[in-house]
Image (tube, rainbow, N blue to C red):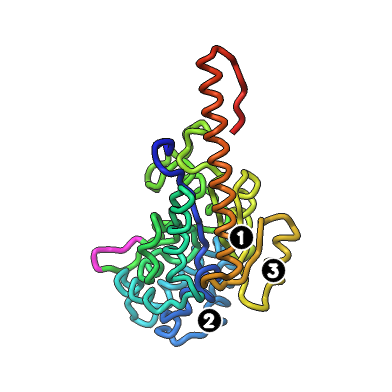
Amino acid sequence: MSTRLNKPVVAFMYDFDGTLSPGNMQEYGFLDKLGESSTEFWRKSNEEARKFEMDPISAYMHLMIKETESRALNISKENLIKLGQTVELFPGVETWFKRINEYAHTKGLKVEHFIISSGLKEIIEGTPIAKEFRKIFASAFIFDAYGKPIWPAQIVNFTTKTQYIFRINKDSLDLADVKKVNQYIPQDERRVPFRRMVYFGDGDTDVPCMKLVKAEGGFSIAVYPARKKEKAGQLLADNRCSYIAPTDYSPDTKVEKLAFGIIDLIAAQENLNKLAEKKFRAKKRQGFHVCLVL
């Protein structure tokens, strides 16, 4: 899909736990139903992952099923979505998307927001911000006819997260379609080139995405809770992210200023590209051969 006749599309991509919301989403309601502490649940999950050499994400998903079955509890899709209503968000998150969209509009750009998370899609879909995202890429269950989770539909871990960046890049958002995402598409024909991508994450599991986006000409922002910037600072020192900022998304905060500044940079680059392309076409009409680098 060409963006030349429309506003250039910018992709803002977010991890969820620790990036838009404090803690892990399972800690909001689900663990209360189990009557289990967060420490104990994650201890069991990590123990199961080591014992069976499981991916940590599949381990926690399996443990959720096992623990609820042992207590005769119901974790249907509907109930998981309801749990999303109890998830806490960082300050300013609920109004963030409107502010970003409006600012980008003034610069001649269109921002689309995406989630790329190892958390549960069903819980994220229950949050008040779910409607803000063009697509939510997250771990998910398959449910039987009675609403009972029986198998993972998607397992999103720290390395598989990167495939969703390429899906956004090529506008291949249907997860059942494995052809388009692997198909060769020239860089200038991709709907969202890397130079118009921004990734927000908070920790080690976001490193592959941060590094990929940054290395390919986009921007990555490591966010951190107030007064706990050591991890984010190390990511910056290791050249794995572009910027760091506290997890306060309120107006006039550092992360908003960074986002607006990045939008300004992208808009300026797009305008330069248009001027260069216009000059190239004029030269071509005159019979000259020039080299255009976008």
- Residue 223: x and y, percent? 61, 67
Q: Main secondary structure of the magenta part?
A: loop
Work out whether residue 15 or residue 100 is closer to the camera in this orientation and state it.
100
Give the mark, 2 or 3, whose residue is nearer the N terminus.
2
| Magenta span of residues | 142-146
Give the mark, 1 or 3, whose residue is nearer the N terminus.
1
155 lies above or below 284: below
- Residue 64: x and y, percent? 43, 73
Q: Quadrant of the C terminus?
A: top right
Farthest-out residue, bottom: 35
Secondary-structure class at tag 1: strand
Number of numbered tags placed on the structure image: 3
Identified by mark 2, the residue type is Ser
Read off the residue under disc 2.
Answer: 38
Answer yes or no: is residue 179 visible. no
Answer yes or no: is residue 71 visible. yes
143 lies above or below 160: below
Tell me if 181 is positioned left or right of 245 in this view: left
Give the residue displayed 34% in from the left and 66% down from the top. Answer: 149
Read off the residue under disc 1.
Answer: 221
Please tell me how crowded label 2 is: few (under 14), some (14-19), or many (20+) other residues with Cα within 10 Å.
some
Disc 2/disc 1 C-alpha distance (Å):
27 Å
Disc number placed over residue 18 in the picture, else none: none
Q: Is residue 91 magenta?
A: no
Work out whether residue 58 or residue 287 is closer to the camera in this orientation and state it.
287
Give the residue displayed 56% in from the left and 44% down from the top. Answer: 194
Read off the residue under disc 3.
Answer: 231
Disc 1/disc 3 C-alpha distance (Å):
12 Å
